[in-house]
Image (cartoon, rainbow, N blue to C red):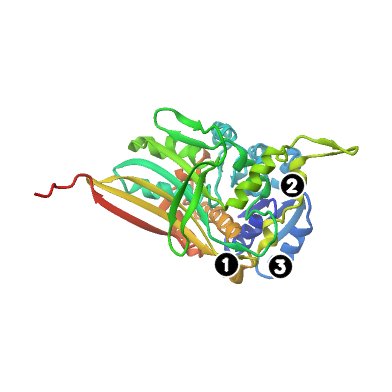
Amino acid sequence: MKVAVLGVGGVGQVFASEIVKADYLDQLLLGDIVTEGAEKLAGKLRHQAKAEIIVKKVDAGKVEEIEKVLKGIDVVLHAGLPAFNFNVMEACINTATNYIDMACASPAGLKEQLQWNDKFKAAGILSIMGLGCDPGFSNIAARYAVDQLDHVDEILIRDGDNSEIDYNGFCSLFSPQTAIEECLAKPNYWTADKGLSFLPEPFANREKFEFPEPIGLLDCYNVEHEEATTLGDTIGKTKGCQYVDFKYALDPDFVNTVKAIGYLGLNSDKDINVKGTKVSPKDVVVAKMPKPTELAGKIHGYSCIGAAVKGTKDDKKKEFFVYTMANHDEIYEKTGHQATVWQTGLPPAVAVDLLAQGKLNDKGCIPPELIDPVPFLTRLKERGMYWDVIEKTSPVTQMATV
């Protein structure tokens, strides 16, 4: 099998480092607009793999360039900015290359990507939208829990991290561009009667959510995210689900800094004139933030992502929390990566495993929750990504005491 990754940042590096372990791999192509990091990674991987490792310069803003590098490629992971998803998808249709990405530009963008379903079916290929950790693992965890229940009341995706970071300044554990964009957007949620809906202001509905130890209680906020865009319609409503949302545990300093960025208009992509030079305010902010790869070894604590699904089974109330947890120091010691990018890079590698094994035969465009969760989660654990289930039960009705 020939595999490509476009965008060789932190997550792209994790994915590439995992894929080279596979016996089915014949060729791995590393593509980026700046190839210095890709060349450095390729030098390391060539000592670990029998497969051919090649590096190509490619501008994801140009469909024709993407097509040139994807000719003959069986599957590509787009690990670049979501703004380029459609360019890579178009190239994949023209080259009959299966497609995976890990995030969308917005809920509307995700819905538009899913509308390419017929195009991908006609090309005889698969497109998976949002297959990282969250979205991605979180969707599949929700599907696993939903499958255990007769009736579902709500699906709640929760992301928490209790880490301290050896960095004196504003930073994000994943793509700074994506972090700023999704945190300042109007948070989305889903209800059975209204479908996809939006809250009027960012950082809404703060609540304390209890993550598994050693994390514990963290303040969580509604944030724009992919899961609430699809889970209600794909796996929720058939079992009576009434509500879906995503909440992110955020430090007060992070929240206040992002709010200030929004108040000052520094989240804008539109160029402004500064002393005769045109600059994008958001580009300036991002340029002053460290890349997620630069934080490896500087993060100390635990990262947890999971799906809390509430409903009933055999006339008993049940609540499942299906989650993955990782220690940043342990992951860094084992892999050289920080846990957040590592957790994001493994799920797409598992999808490629299943494609190679003939266990993922879908065609068209699908969100991750439409993947069979059992073989996926089994393979994920085989690749070293821990996950577990917390289950709570109680009777629907209790006998009155006399």
Q: Which residue is mark 1?
A: 331
Going from N to C along the chain, the mark reached first, 3 or 2, is 3
Q: Quadrant of residue 1?
A: bottom right
x, y percentage for residue 19? 60, 60
Q: CA distance from mark 1 to mark 2?
A: 28 Å
Front residue (pair 117, 253): 253
Please, which residue is most extreme toward the right here?
276
Point out which mark residue 44 bears: 3
Going from N to C along the chain, the mark reached first, 1 or 3, is 3
Q: How many marks?
A: 3
Q: CA distance from mark 3 to mark 2?
A: 32 Å
Q: CA distance from mark 1 to mark 3?
A: 18 Å
Front residue (pair 151, 253): 253
Residue 123 versus residue 174 in the image, above or below: above
Label 2 is placed on what type of residue?
Val
x, y percentage for residue 58? 76, 47
Label 3 is placed on what type of residue?
Lys
Q: Residues within 10 Å of mark 2 (few under 14, many from 20)?
A: some
Give the secondary structure at mark 3.
Answer: helix
Point out which mark residue 272 bears: none
